[in-house]
Amino acid sequence: MNNDFLIPLLTIILPLIGGGIGFFIKGIIEKRKDLDSQVTKKRRAHYQDFVNIVIDLFGSKKTGKNQPDEQVLVKLFDFYKKYVLYASPEVINSFSDYFQYLYSTNSDSAKMDYKIHFQKLSRILIEMRKDLGLSNKNLGKDGVRIFRALLTDFDEIMK
């Protein structure tokens, strides 16, 4: 008699428990998706700031209205403060590699190898694009072709 009561009870309770667990897991997944979406929005905004800094720098060089290196560094440090919480480790590492290169050349343009400079700078952009889920196909090794539209002597620098 005891088994006759237990089987119907289990057929009612087990699906309820399974449904509750499924609902709980679905809630966790939805929260994670929402957080990822918010982080991606923040990343896009911060990454766009970086692109603006880089393109403004190139534009100022072409027009002869160079920004002092100190202004550019201040903008880059401001960018770093904003993005460090949202960027992927790959973006943070490539940005750090770029700054370490700048520190090692100590802003001495005669000492700077522009090929390495553009490779490190473009590596940041490639990692940002990866972070946002964009394709980097046909952008060259380390994405150096990203700067091709901005430099008239691109092919000369990249030899």
Image: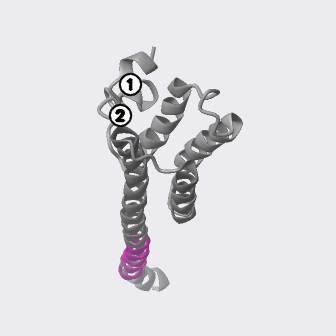
Rendered image quadrant of residue 122: top left
The residue positioned 38% from the left and 24% from the top of the image is: 140
Q: Which of marks 2 and 1 is nearer the N terminus?
A: 1
In the rendered structure, the answer to whether residue 56 lies left or right of residue 97 reads left
Q: Where is residue 34 in the image (x, y as percent from the top left)?
A: 37, 70
The residue positioned 63% from the left and 39% from the top of the image is: 107
What type is the residue that disc 2 sits on?
Ile
Q: Is residue 158 above or below residue 97?
A: above
Q: Do the residues labelled 2 and 1 touch (CB within 8 Å)?
A: yes
Q: Nearer the viewer, residue 139 or 116?
A: 116
The residue positioned 42% from the left and 52% from the top of the image is: 53
Q: Is residue 154 above or below residue 129?
A: above
In the rendered structure, the answer to whether residue 36 lies left or right of residue 96 reads left
What type is the residue that disc 1 sits on?
Gly
Q: Residue 146 — which label?
A: 2
Callout 1: few (<14), some (14-19), or many (20+) C-alpha neighbours within 10 Å?
few
Callout 2: few (<14), some (14-19), or many (20+) C-alpha neighbours within 10 Å?
some
Q: Position of residue 155 (x, y in %)?
A: 37, 18
Rendered image quadrant of residue 135: top left
Q: Which of 34 and 3 is in front in this view?
A: 34
Query: Of tags 2 and 1, which is closer to the observer?
Result: 2
Query: In the picture, which quadrant includes the N terminus?
Result: bottom left
Q: Residue 140 — which label?
A: 1
The residue positioned 55% from the left and 64% from the top of the image is: 85
Magenta stretch encompasses residue 45: no
Tell which residue pokes out farthest to the front in this image.
64
Predominant secondary structure, magenta span: helix
Q: What stretch is highlighted in magenta?
A: 12-28
Q: Where is residue 96 in the image (x, y as percent from the top left)?
A: 62, 45
